[in-house]
Each structure stands twice: as structure tokens, then as C-alpha cells.
């Protein structure tokens, strides 16, 4: 067990390799109850959320969710979060390590009439992720009716759940919000139902490998308050023309001048795992540092993200990374390293209609 | 195994006449998590006790390997280059790392099973 944002979490249940492969080939079940969950209510909520985050939440209908960033006045990333819209207002899921900071930040910026309630401890959260997640989830709801980044109510193994087609692995799958006193029961039922198909409980190690292959950024590693969305390659979440929001003015300047840094993907040689903070250079000239790195059991080689000077590296370029005190060769590759099943469901649907 | 001895840095050594076999302990592999790579020395190299002789790289971290005893390397486990996971699945058997021609006496700082168990219990608290 390791400490993760104050929560005791398993790095692995059995083996990171087996758990990771289960997620890529069948489905894996993650306990992500450590993530912060806030309910936002009151008349002023839509306007408040719109000026709090970077994406355009006015586009969100009830039953839809959206990936977002929350910025400070300098355009630095306070946190990344998923915003859910429903008839009772908004619900947000934030990083575990930022829960208290985010709560204070939101309350400090909220107008009168907006209620922000921390529901982290009354609602559990588990994520069932993999190409066969839909088929293997014991659930009475019509999951075909839940699009990518959509959510609805249903029952999982007879237990009331909020079912969201979201995740952090690059695979299709669901995040299940269930009352804390019944989450254990649901966990056991999902695992039992999928056991013969190869479903495994998966820990933080498998989660980190899967999210990195999918090039999903991790707050605290790949971005933080000193990094702006354009540097992190998350400009697609920023809607500068939606009206005012926190950090907008700073971002307009960054966009006009161009970001100073960029996040790139690196493929390493077997055995050369680039660790957070390792120096990245070309011909002796330092360009930046590794932000995340691991061995990908699925791809069969180590992969890494690096924050480097803007326009210093492009896909196909060679660089070197300091690994165990020596210079290890790296190749710049396209992101994501692996595109899982995450969008294929909605893409299939679209092609059926069109 | 009665004659297996341990280091505080979580290597084990078992001695048969002049030949010493070296690996990392079950506790070490469980702490490291899935091993993905080993950087190992060549046959013929001489090691003094406590010399670093290689690196074990797991998904979590890279850790140095220390020689529990002095000697000349007579064999390196080739299987580990294609199957590093043997360190996890069988650390005292198929996951052995080096064989040495022992030189001199066994260092007195080596721990027996009971003393090593204490070390591991302390480090998990």
C-alpha cells in the first residue's frame, strides 16, 4: 500500500503487468474513491462554473460531462476536473491531492447563492475500464444510451448508481458513483461477474501506465500551477471566446505570443525508464525535463512525457534522457502512445447514423 | 534454506563450498513491484563485499544491487534478460542473479533469517 494524497492505496493487487493487460484486453476495476467529489447547487451555479473553468459549460446538457481546467489569474493550472451537468446543478470530480485546495479555491470565488458541498466521503467511486467493460458490467440500464462523456442513473448488481461513460485509461468504460456504504458490495459483484472473462481489480500502477499510454496528463507531474494549458497541450479545453473566466487574460497573452514550452512524447529503449525530473537534451543542450515515465507492458517498451522548449523537438527527432546517470536514447513520437477503445463506441454510433 | 544469509540492502546469498549464489529477497521484490529490467555485470569481474554490481529496474524505481560477499563472478543468470519477471515470481530459485567464486570469509554483518525478518518488519512500520 502506498500513500496517495493522504489515502492508503494499493500500487497493485496482484501484478501491475497483469492488471494493466486486463484493462487493455478485457476490463479492470479501479477504486478511485480517493478523488474529490463536490456538488454545486444554487441559482448562480451555471454562471459561476462558466467563469471558474476553461471549457464552455453552457454547451453541456443534463446528463453530459466535460473535461475542464481550473486556472489561477496567471493562467497556471490549479487542477484538472470533470464537470457533470444534471437537473440538480453541477457535480465535479477533482484530484485527490487537490481536494481541500480546490474546495477552498471554489468557495473563495463563489458568489452568494452558490452552495458547494464536499460529498467525497458519502459517495464512493469505482471505475470499470476496458474494451469489454460494457458487455461485462452487471447493470440493468441501457448503456448504449450513455454516450462517451455522458451519464445516467441505473442499478449495478441491484445497487443504485450514477453511471458515467468516462475514465482515465483511454479505454471505453464507466465510472460508477455509489453510496459509500454499498460501494464494497458493488465492487465485489462487478469482480465476481467478470471473473471468468479475465476482469481483475487494478491498482495505481496499472492506472498510471494506462493513463500515460493514453497521454492523459497527471496533475502534479505533467502540469501544475506553473504550467499553462497551451504548454500542457490542453489548449482544446480552453474556449477563450466563451466570455470571461479566471485566467483568461493571461491565456490571451500566451496564445498571442505562443507558449514557451511544449509537452512531447518519448519512446525509450527497453530497460531505460525515464523518471520524473530527468534531463532531456540534444547534442548537450538541455531542453527540459521528463514529467512522467514508465515501462509499458502493453507496448513492450518504456514511454515518457517531457516538458521541453517550444519548437525544440518534433515527431521523429532523437533526443537523450538521463537514466541512471547516463544518457539514454529517446525518440519523439506522436501522442497518444496508444489509442484505446474510449471513443470507438460513439464513433461506431456516428457511422451507423451517417 | 538453512544456509541462506541476507543483507540490510535486501540481497540474499547462499553458499555451497566455494560457490556463492546471489539474488534479491522476496521482501525486496514485493516492495519493488514488477521488475522490467536488470543491468548486470559480466562473468569474470571481481567484486568486493558491498560493491554495487548492477541495477534492478521496476515500474516504480531503479535500485542498486550490492554484493553481499567478495568473489569473482562465474555466472550471470541469462534468463533474466528476457524474463525479468522471474525476480518477482521466484526470487530464491529461478530468479537468482549471480554466482561467485567466494573469496575470504563471509562478512560478519550478514543476517540470518530471523534477524532479516526483523529488518523487514521495521521497514514496513
Image (cartoon, coloured by chain):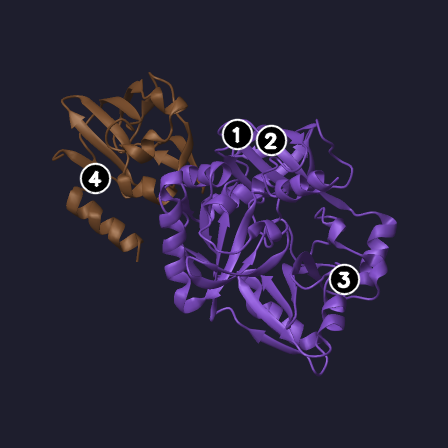
Chain colours: A purple, B brown
Q: Are marks 3 and 1 in contact (CB under 8 Å)?
A: no
CA–CA distance in space, label 2 to label 4: 41 Å
Query: Is A201 on the left-hand or right-hand side of A341?
Result: left
Q: Earlier in the sequence, mark 2 or mark 3?
A: 3
Residue A350 percent location from the top left of the image = 71, 42
Q: Which chain carries label 2?
A: A
The residue that mark 1 highlights is A301
CA–CA distance in space, label 1 to label 2: 7 Å
Q: Do the residues labelled 1 and 4 touch (CB within 8 Å)?
A: no
Residue A43 percent location from the top left of the image = 72, 79
Q: Are marks 1 and 2 in contact (CB under 8 Å)?
A: yes
User: Which disc, if any, is residue A74?
Assistant: 3
**Secondary element type, mark 4:** loop
Query: Is A165 on the left-hand or right-hand side of A347?
Result: left
Quadrant hosting residue A164: bottom right
The residue that mark 4 highlights is B110
The residue that mark 2 highlights is A267
- In the image, which is nearer the foreground, mark 1 or mark 4? 1
Amino acid at each position: 500500500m502506498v500513500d496517495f494524497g493522504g489515502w492508503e492505496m494499493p500500487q497493485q493487487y496482484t501484478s501491475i503487468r497483469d492488471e494493466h493487460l486486463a484493462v487493455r484486453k478485457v476490463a479492470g476495476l479501479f477504486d478511485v474513491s480517493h478523488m474529490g467529489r463536490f456538488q454545486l447547487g444554487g441559482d448562480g451555479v451555471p454562471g459561476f462554473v462558466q467563469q471558474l473553468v476553461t471549457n464552455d459549460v453552457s454547451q453541456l446538457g443534463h446528463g453530459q460531462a466535460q473535461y475542464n481546467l481550473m486556472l489561477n489569474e496567471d493562467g497556471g493550472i490549479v487542477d484538472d476536473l470533470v464537470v457533470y451537468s444534471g437537473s440538480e446543478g453541477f457535480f465535479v470530480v477533482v484530484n485527490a491531492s487537490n481536494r481541500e485546495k480546490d474546495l477552498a479555491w471554489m468557495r473563495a470565488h463563489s458568489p452568494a447563492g452558490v452552495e458547494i458541498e464536499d460529498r467525497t466521503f458519502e459517495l464512493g467511486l469505482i471505475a470499470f475500464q476496458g474494451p469489454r467493460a460494457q458487455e461485462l458490467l452487471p447493470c440493468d440500464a441501457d448503456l448504449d444510451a450513455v454516450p462517451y462523456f455522458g451519464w445516467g442513473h441505473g442499478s449495478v448488481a441491484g445497487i443504485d448508481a450514477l453511471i458515467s461513460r468516462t475514465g482515465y485509461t483511454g479505454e471505453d468504460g464507466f465510472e460508477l458513483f455509489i453510496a459509500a456504504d454499498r460501494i464494497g458490495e458493488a465492487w465485489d459483484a462487478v469482480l465476481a461477474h467478470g471473473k471468468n472473462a479475465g476482469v481483475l481489480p487494478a491498482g495505481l500502477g496499472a492506472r498510471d501506465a494506462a493513463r500515460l499510454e493514453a497521454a492523459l496528463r497527471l496533475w502534479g507531474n505533467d502540469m501544475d500551477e506553473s504550467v499553462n494549458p497551451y504548454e500542457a497541450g490542453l489548449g482544446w479545453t480552453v474556449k477563450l471566446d466563451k466570455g470571461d473566466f479566471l485566467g483568461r487574460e493571461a491565456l490571451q497573452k500566451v496564445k498571442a505570443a505562443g507558449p514557451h514550452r511544449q509537452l512531447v512524447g518519448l519512446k525509450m529503449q527497453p530497460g531505460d525508464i525515464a523518471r520524473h525530473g530527468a534531463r532531456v537534451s540534444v547534442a548537450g543542450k538541455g531542453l527540459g525535463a521528463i514529467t512522467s515515465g514508465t515501462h509499458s507492458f502493453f507496448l513492450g517498451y518504456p514511454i515518457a512525457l517531457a516538458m521541453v522548449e517550444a519548437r525544440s523537438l518534433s515527431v521523429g527527432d532523437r533526443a537523450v534522457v538521463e537514466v541512471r546517470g547516463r544518457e539514454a536514447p529517446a525518440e519523439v513520437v506522436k501522442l497518444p502512445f496508444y489509442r484505446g477503445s474510449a471513443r470507438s463506441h460513439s464513433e461506431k454510433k456516428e457511422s451507423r447514423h451517417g | 534454506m538453512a544456509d541462506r544469509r541476507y543483507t540490510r540492502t535486501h540481497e540474499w546469498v547462499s553458499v555451497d563450498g566455494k560457490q556463492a549464489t546471489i539474488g534479491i529477497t522476496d521482501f525486496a521484490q514485493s516492495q519493488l513491484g514488477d521488475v522490467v529490467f536488470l543491468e548486470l555485470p559480466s562473468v569474470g569481474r571481481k567484486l568486493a563485499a558491498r560493491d554495487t554490481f548492477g541495477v534492478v529496474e521496476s515500474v516504480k524505481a531503479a535500485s542498486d544491487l550490492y554484493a553481499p560477499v567478495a568473489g569473482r563472478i562465474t555466472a550471470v543468470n541469462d534468463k533474466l534478460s528476457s524474463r525479468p519477471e522471474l525476480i518477482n515470481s521466484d526470487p530464491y530459485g529461478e530468479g537468482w542473479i549471480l554466482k561467485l567464486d567466494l573469496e575470504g570469509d563471509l562478512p560478519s554483518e550478514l543476517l540470518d533469517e530471523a534477524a532479516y525478518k526483523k529488518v523487514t518488519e521495521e521497514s514496513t512500520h
